[in-house]
Amino acid sequence: MQPLILVPARRATAGRVSRHPVSFVVQPSIDALRRAGAEVWILPPAELTPDDARALLERADGLCLQGGADIHPRHYRDVAEGHDVAGVDELQDHTELALTLAALDLGMPVLALCRGAELLNVACGGTLHDLDAAEHHPPSTPGSVGVLHDVTIEPGCRLRDALGVDRAAVSSVHHQAIARLGDDLVVTALAADGVIEAIERRSGWTVGVQWHPEDTAAIDATQQQLFDAFVVVCRGADAAPA
């Protein structure tokens, strides 16, 4: 059976590709999930109540949070503070926070990528901060792979079990990162400069990575294995131990 993975979409304005605004998920993420044996359910941003979010997720087997724009600072700090955010979409924030909280409440497997990891941390009561390091800034060429750098992975964690390595080269595209860790979360990977690169919930299968495994999953088996492990857990077979 193919597990059904709910993937919240991002929004874009009308342009040369479409005469109307669009909701989308980047193709590499869809491809990586399908290679792992999943069916993908793309959900456009919507005004969801907690009950709405729970009802949607009860029809799915897992939640995969994608990369994208910054999260509005009001969700994790006083907006009177200085902050450097770009592309904030408050409807997307609302949708993904509602879905994340519902998924955590249901004990559903969650894979959170880049912005998704930041959002997971915020949903659990954590905070974010801005980065100055150039190596974490987005690439200038659309469609390009982010800056490749190494991360060190903690032993005995779900991420280590999924990737099968204690050190990996990853594609990073972000200018914010986790500051104060959210409740019930642990750090499972770090970059050489100390940036938190992965987090996990203490219970269940909830893994967030600050990088973009979808960027290189088609050519890097280690990164594809993260999607594979997630889909295996969503299928309910050979689930990772809590």
Image (tube, rainbow, N blue to C red):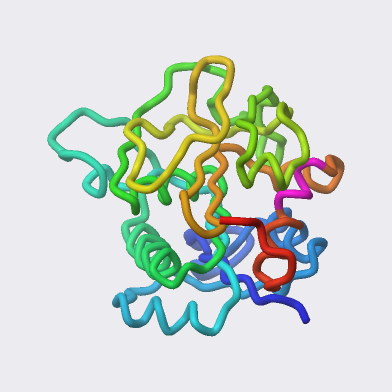
**Measured from the top left, where is residue 160 in percent x and y?**
68, 39
Q: Is residue 65 left or right of residue 153?
A: left
Indicate whether 76 appears above or below 233. Answer: above
Q: How many marks?
A: 0
Residue drawn at the location 71% of the way across and 35% of the way down: 145
Viewer-closest of 171 and 183: 183
Q: Is residue 87 left or right of residue 75?
A: right
| Secondary structure character of the magenta stretch overall | helix
Viewer-closest of 100 and 91: 100
Quadrant of the drawing holding the N terminus: bottom right
Q: Is residue 151 left or right of residue 182?
A: right
Residue drawn at the location 59% of the way across and 66% of the way down: 18
Residue drawn at the location 64% of the way across and 26% of the way down: 151
Indicate whether 151 appears above or below 26. Answer: above
Viewer-closest of 83 and 229: 229
Indicate whether 41 appears above or below 113. Answer: below
Quadrant of the drawing holding the C terminus: bottom right
**Measured from the top left, where is residue 130 in percent x and y?**
37, 27
**Which stretch is magenta?**
222-226
Q: Pick out the residue farthest to the left.
A: 80
Viewer-closest of 34 and 17: 34
**Measured from the top left, where is residue 80 in percent x and y?**
13, 35
Indicate whether 35 appears above or below 222. Answer: below
Q: Tell me which corner region of the image, top left, top right, bottom left or bottom right, holds residue 163.
A: top right
Q: Is residue 240 left or right of residue 60?
A: right
| Residue 170 is covered by the magenta coloring | no
**Measured from the top left, where is residue 165 in percent x and y?**
76, 33
